[in-house]
Image (spheres, rainbow, N blue to C red):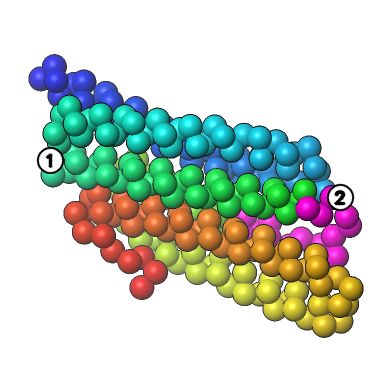
Amino acid sequence: MIRRKGFDRELNQLRDLLLKMAEHVNTALVDAINSLKSGDLKLAQKVVSKDIQLNAMEEEIMELGTKLIITQQPVAKDLRRIIVAFKISSDLERMGDLALDVAKVTLRMEGQKLIKPLIDIPRMGEIVKLMIDESINSYLDENADLAYKMAKTDDEVDELYSHMITDLYALMVDHPQDASQAMLLMMVGRYIERIGDHATNIGESAVYLVTGKRPDLNQ
């Protein structure tokens, strides 16, 4: 019983670290998009400088999970909890990298005026932020239904991204001198769309934790 309590305590540490990683990604995403909207280079640099914290949390999860596997030899659902924690931490780290990429676009633009008001990108960011929250909650609560719901939410992001690309291509035709910034904004849309894909991956991991089978939520 004492051994089980220790095991549960360390599993909870994994959960807490994953929650912190998700919170870090959400903050980085919001700050990166806000830096793009306002041309705030200091805010963008803040996102860049804090990325190392997310990497450190991923390493801590890997070390703790590996120790649990070696010392506790978990089986069945207990083993899945650790394997899923590894997968989710990898997705979250990649999401953080993509938020970092958005901030780097702000730095590349060096405060230049935006060629059009940002509408689709902030809306995509709001939806993806919700997806991050729902994905991590689907894991923490072992809620497969919430994970399946995310597939429809991801479709909304894809539609906004497609709409944004169409608008920017039309702008490039009419104003070829703005093509460089238009391409950068397309990249930002792609980065945010990819964050949504990783959030869907986390939902799939939550379903695997609950059922022992890995679905494809995009089908």
User: How far across and down, in percent of the image, does residue 190 sit?
Assistant: 61, 64
Q: Residue, x 52% and y 36% (percent of image)?
A: 54
- Can residue 134 be seen at all in this image of the molecule? no
Q: Is residue 22 within the magenta segment?
A: no
In this view, the residue farthest toward the top is 2
Q: Quadrant of the C terminus?
A: bottom left
Relative to residue 37, is residue 77 drawn left or right?
left
> Looking at this view, is 16 or 109 the one in front?
109
The residue stretch that appears in magenta: 108-126
Q: CA distance from mark 2 to mark 1?
A: 54 Å
Q: In the rendered structure, which amino acid carries the disc numbered 2? A: Gly
Q: Residue, x 62% and y 55% (percent of image)?
A: 125
Is residue 89 positioned above or below 59 on the image?
A: below
User: How far across and down, in percent of the image, does residue 8 sit?
Assistant: 23, 27
Query: Residue 45's mark?
Result: none
In terms of image quadrants, where is residue 142? top left
Q: Quadrant of the N terminus?
A: top left
Q: Residue, x 26% and y 39% (percent of image)?
A: 82
Query: Which sits earlier in the primary sequence, circle 2 or circle 1?
Result: 1
Relative to residue 83, is residue 105 drawn left or right?
right
Residue where numbered disc 2 is placed: 111
Residue where numbered disc 1 is placed: 75
Element assignment for label 2 = loop
Q: In the rendered structure, which amino acid carries the disc numbered 1? A: Val
Is residue 188 positioned above or below 178 on the image?
A: above
In terms of image quadrants, where is residue 193? bottom right
- Can residue 174 be seen at all in this image of the molecule? yes
Q: Is residue 121 within the magenta segment?
A: yes
User: How far across and down, in percent of the image, does residue 64 sit?
Assistant: 31, 29
User: How far across and down, in percent of the image, does residue 103 sit?
Assistant: 69, 48
